[in-house]
Structure formats: structure tokens, C-alpha cells
Image (cartoon, rainbow, N blue to C red):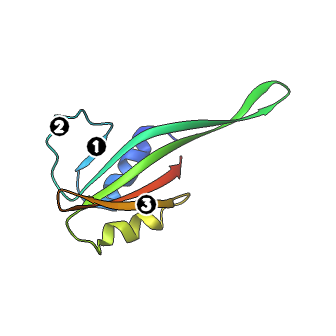
Amino acid sequence: MKSRLELHEALVDILGSRNVYFQPPEKTEMKFPAIVYSKSDIKNGFANGKVYLQNHIFKVIVVDKDPDSEIVTKMSKFDTAKFDRSYIVDRLNHTVFTIFY
């Protein structure tokens, strides 16, 4: 299993900047474009009454002024990424992905 910090660095590479935030507090001042992500679930695989496999599931949100953001395209090509939805808040485009990592 890869670590969350490895995921963080992979998201920094996709974004091309350090504007990647893991579960930021409400008062965090973010710079855009940005990627915001949080852990949303852990799926366990069982055998003989024991956990033999774990998949950590993250919600990843690309936030950008550009509705045709190349960051969204890059994120959509990330291994295990699944598009969830998109919406607009405060004139910023939010594109949500679910990833297993």
C-alpha cells in the first residue's frame, strides 16, 4: 500500500504547484488552481477472518477558474481515478474524482 504522502506528491505533480491541500480547515486560505483531497473510505478484503487487502479511497477535487482545465484532464488519467461530478461555487469550477490509493 502506498502512503498518503506519496499520493500528495503525485497530486502536486499533476497540478504543477504546491497548492494541494489535505483536509484543510475551513479558514485555510487557498491559492488557485488547487487540488483539495480527503480520505472518504477504507475498503477491506478478507480471507480466513483476517484483512489481507486494504484500499484507501480519497475524494479529490480540482478547483480552477478555467472550466476546460488541463488539470482535470490530467487527473482523469490518474490510475484508479473515477469522475464523480462537477459544480461551480463562487465562480470556481470544482471537479470531483474518487480514487483508490
Chain-order first, disc 2 or disc 1:
1
Task: Compute the Cα span from label 3 to label 1.
Answer: 19 Å
Residue 54, horizontal then vertical, whole percent: 64, 37
**Residue bearing mark 2:** 28
Is 13 displayed left or right of 28 in the figure?
A: right
Look at the numbered discs 3 and 1 and tell me whether their residues touch, using CB distance below 8 Å: no
Residue furthest toward the bottom? 68
Residue 56 tag number = none
The residue under the point 18% across, 62% down is 91
Residue 75, horizontal then vertical, whole percent: 41, 63
Task: Compute the Cα span from label 2 to label 3.
Answer: 24 Å
Looking at the rendered image, the disc whose residue lies closer to the viewer, 2 or 3, is 3
**Residue bearing mark 3:** 85
The residue under the point 17% across, 37% down is 28
Chain-order first, disc 2 or disc 3:
2
Task: Compute the Cα span from label 2 to label 1.
Answer: 9 Å
Residue 72, horizontal then vertical, whole percent: 36, 67
Label 3 Cα crowd, 10 Å radius (few <14 / some 14-19 / many 20+): few
Instruction: Classify mark 3: helix, strand or loop.
Output: strand
Q: Is residue 32 above or below residue 77?
A: above
Looking at the rendered image, the disc whose residue lies closer to the viewer, 2 or 1, is 2
Look at the numbered discs 2 and 1 and tell me whether their residues touch, using CB distance below 8 Å: yes
Q: Quadrant of the N terminus?
A: top right
Instruction: Classify mark 2: helix, strand or loop.
Output: loop
Residue 21 tag number = 1
- Amino acid under disc 3: Arg
The quarter of the displayed image where residue 43 is located: top right
Chain-order first, disc 3 or disc 1:
1
- Amino acid under disc 1: Tyr
